[in-house]
Image (cartoon, rainbow, N blue to C red):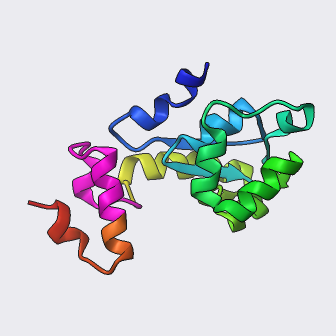
């Protein structure tokens, strides 16, 4: 099962998760493997298996620490605490919170226009490693255009 939950990470094109409701356990681990996560206001997130003495062993721990940082990830992982969509947004677990009726139109808009990605990245010509390098370059003040556009 762990292999299936990381499939989204191995796809060469960006993967967008559309979350509308409870996203617990393996569902959250799958969402964490996606590049972009959109959620409705009614969404809730948790890894409740830790309360039963189980470990989220499909990559959820590693992904959560990378996304949220050690302190927030430890807090959520040790308590199995549920958080709502706005808290998940604040923590960096998701990228946008939308009303339920706006979720699908926003997903379609992002998929069609690639609004969050430069046109060169939308073509799928670049690997996730190259995308990570591009993001790192931007964070370090280098130009994305000189890094990836021939």
Give whichever of 32, 21 is nearer the camera.
32
Q: Is residue 68 above or below residue 108?
A: below
On the rendered structure, is 146 left or right of 41? Answer: left
Where does residue 71 sit, x and y in percent of width and height?
73, 64
Exactly how many numbered labels are in the figure? 0
On the rendered structure, is 38 left or right of 13? Answer: right
**Residue with the most extreme bottom position:** 141
Where does residue 109 sit, x and y in percent of width and height?
46, 52
On the rendered structure, is 59 left or right of 86? Answer: left
Does the rendering let one see residue 56? yes
Instruction: Identify which residue is drawn at 79% across, 40% down.
Output: 47
Quarter holding the N terminus is top right
Does the rendering let one see residue 82? no
Q: Quadrant of residue 75?
A: bottom right
Instruction: Identify which residue is drawn at 49% across, 45% down.
Output: 108
Where does residue 27 sit, x and y in percent of width and height?
70, 33
Instruction: Identify which residue is drawn at 84% across, 37% down.
Output: 50
Q: Quadrant of residue 51?
A: top right
Magenta span: predominant SS is: helix
Instruction: Identify which residue is drawn at 67% across, 43% down.
Output: 19
Give whichever of 119, 1 is nearer the camera.
1
- As for residue 39 lying within the magenta part, the answer is no
Where does residue 25 sit, x and y in percent of width and height?
76, 34
Q: Which residues are magenta?
A: 116-135
- As for residue 132 lying within the magenta part, the answer is yes
Give whichever of 81, 87 is nearer the camera.
81
């Amino acid at each position: 099962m762990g292999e299936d939950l990381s499939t989204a990470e191995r796809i060469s094109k960006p993967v967008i998760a559309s979350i509308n409701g409870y996203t617990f356990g393996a569902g959250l681990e799958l969402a964490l493997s996606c590049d972009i996560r959109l959620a409705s206001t009614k969404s809730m997130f948790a890894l409740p298996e830790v309360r039963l003495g189980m470990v989220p062993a499909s990559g959820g721990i590693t992904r959560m620490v990378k996304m949220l940082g050690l302190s927030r990830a430890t807090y959520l992982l040790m308590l199995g605490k549920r958080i709502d969509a706005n808290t998940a947004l604040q923590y960096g677990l998701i990228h946008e919170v939308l009303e339920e009726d706006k979720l699908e139109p926003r997903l379609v808009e992002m998929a069609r226009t690639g609004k969050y990605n430069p046109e060169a990245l939308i073509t799928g010509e670049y690997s996730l490693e190259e995308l990570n390098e591009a993001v790192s370059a931007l964070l370090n003040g280098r130009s994305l255009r000189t890094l990836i556009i021939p």
